[in-house]
Image (cartoon, rainbow, N blue to C red):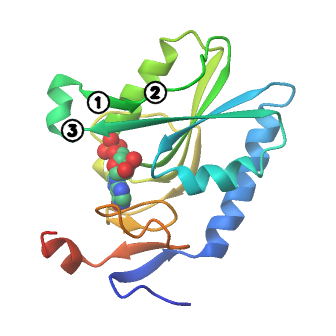
């Protein structure tokens, strides 16, 4: 298997991801049987995961997207997560499934869950491909979790460092020398 020169090692192979995404899709389809789903992808990181996930969901599913920017730890005191792109559709009365790439500190998801719950949906759940629980600042309940990973910076399958590496088909640990370059 090809390893990108900027990466230290492969954490999750294409096969690992494919298998887990099929399982998640099957579980979500069972849980939402008889309902219509509104899958809300969080741009840009969840784009590739969402595309694969929804093709494994068999209940009627609508798609929408949000883009947010988090100010990291400093956002904790102000509680500030900025919405860069809001939903196109109303979620009132809908069964919303937020689809995210990774839950790290939990700041972004904590905000998004609260924000979407305030819009009068029938339900709101969260599906995250990756969970990095060692870095959690605010608690987040992940209803569907792909993989729990150690505290390492990962890229690929939609996840980036400075907008790069999103197109790698595997999830890889980025070499620390890449962020030490101070790009
Ligand atoms: P949180 O608010 O700290 O949970 O931040 C979640 C966001 O941080 C994710 O949507 C990612 O965009 C980014 N992020 C956190 N950890 C990683 C990582 O290991 N690789 C790439 N992006 C990450």
**Quarter holding the C terminus?**
bottom left
Between 69 and 9, the residue placed more toward the observer is: 69
Instruction: Name the residue beneath numbered marker 3.
Output: 71
Work out how far the residue at label 1 is from the one at label 2, CA to CA, in angstroms: 12 Å
Q: Are marks 1 and 2 in contact (CB under 8 Å)?
A: no
Residue farthest toward the right in the current orientation of the protein: 34
The residue at the point 42 percent across, 28 percent down is 112
Q: Secondary structure at mark 2?
A: loop
Residue 141 spot, x, y in % from top left: 48, 34
The residue at the point 84 percent across, 42 percent down is 58
Q: Is residue 117 above or below residue 113?
A: above
Whether disc 2's CB lies below 8 Å from ligand 1 is answered: no
Instruction: Name the residue beneath numbered marker 1.
Output: 81
Residue 24 is at least partly visible in this image: yes
Observer-side mark, 2 or 3, equals 2
Work out how far the residue at label 3 is from the one at label 1, CA to CA, in angstroms: 7 Å
Label whose residue precedes the other's in the sequence (1 or 2): 1
Whether disc 1's CB lies below 8 Å from ligand 1 is answered: yes
The crowd level at tag 3 (other Cα within 10 Å; few <14, some 14-19, many 20+) is some
The residue at the point 43 percent across, 19 percent down is 115
């Amino acid at each position: 298997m090809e390893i990108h020169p900027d990466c230290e090692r492969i954490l999750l192979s294409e096969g690992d991801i494919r298998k887990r995404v099929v399982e998640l899709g099957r579980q979500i389809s069972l849980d939402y049987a008889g309902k219509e789903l509104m899958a809300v992808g969080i741009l840009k990181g969840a784009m590739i995961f969402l595309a694969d996930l929804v093709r494994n969901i068999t209940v009627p599913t609508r798609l929408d997207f949000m883009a947010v920017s988090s100010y990291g730890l400093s956002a904790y005191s102000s509680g500030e997560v900025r919405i860069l792109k809001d939903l196109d559709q109303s979620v009132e009365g809908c069964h919303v499934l937020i689809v995210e790439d990774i839950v790290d500190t939990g700041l972004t998801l904590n905000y998004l869950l609260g924000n979407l719950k305030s819009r009068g949906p029938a339900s709101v759940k969260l599906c995250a491909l990756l969970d990095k629980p060692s870095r959690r600042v605010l608690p987040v309940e992940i209803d569907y979790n792909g993989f729990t990973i150690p505290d390492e910076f990962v890229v690929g399958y939609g996840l980036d460092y400075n907008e790069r590496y999103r197109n790698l088909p595997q999830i890889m640990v980025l070499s620390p020398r890449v962020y030490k370059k101070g790009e």
